[in-house]
Amino acid sequence: MANVFWITGLSSAGKTTLAKLLTDNLRSKNLSVVMLDGDELRSALKIDSNFTGDERLDLAFKYSRLSKLISSQGVNVVVGTIALFKEIHLWNRKNIPGYFEIYLRVPLSERRRRDPKEIYKRYYSGELQNVAGLDLAIDEPTNPDLVIDFSKGLTPEKSLKMVINNFNNKLNKG
């Protein structure tokens, strides 16, 4: 059975970095895996919007349905997307077999320090709006399989080990 690893967190939380590490790890074990990154999906599908709350929710459901479709064909999926909506978390858990949710909790000060796309810089200068967690409300996951708290100074590599260990523990219990 294929699994869906859903990595969620706010902008600059490290979703793409962890998704790439996890994807590489799964491939090194000769497992079929597809990585779906929010930025890459929007670019590939030519989705350009203001990213209001409703637009983000609609887009997140598309990612969920695509993940379910791919995993139903025996391919593991690693998703890196904000998608911080309770509706998405509940739908995924109910509808995607092998769903494993990873929430990256990163303090705002650290996200602002990283800020590779200058989202926070543009928001605070008034150039950008509809930023999840700032002027757009989010729903933190209430029941993630794993919370990675970066206020504890974790590296991406240590985070990957946490994902693998927690996932293996979940499999052994189930």
Image (tube, rainbow, N blue to C red):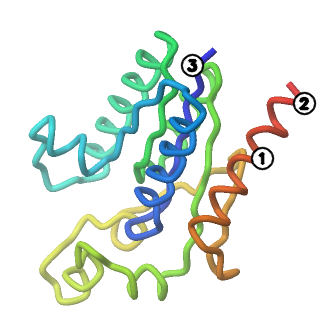
Residue at 46 percent of width and 10 percent of height: 73
CA distance separating discs 1 and 2: 11 Å
Residue 8 as seen in the image, left or right of residue 135: right
Percent of width and height locating residue 97: 63, 19
In the displayed structure, 70 sits above or below 25; it is above
Which residue is labeled 3 in the image? 95
Percent of width and height locating residue 16: 40, 56
Residue 174 as seen in the image, left or right of residue 150: right
How many C-alpha atoms fall within 10 Å of the one at disc 2: few (<14), some, or many (≥20)? few
Q: Amino acid at mark 2?
A: Lys
Give 3 or 86, whichever is nearer the viewer.
Answer: 3
Earlier sequence position, callout 3 versus callout 1:
3
Which residue is labeled 2 in the image? 173
Q: Amino acid at mark 1?
A: Asn
Residue at 43 percent of width and 48 percent of height: 80
Earlier sequence position, callout 1 versus callout 2:
1
Percent of width and height locating residue 51: 22, 53
Which residue is labeled 1 in the image? 166
Q: Secondary structure at mark 2?
A: helix
Q: Amino acid at mark 3?
A: Asn
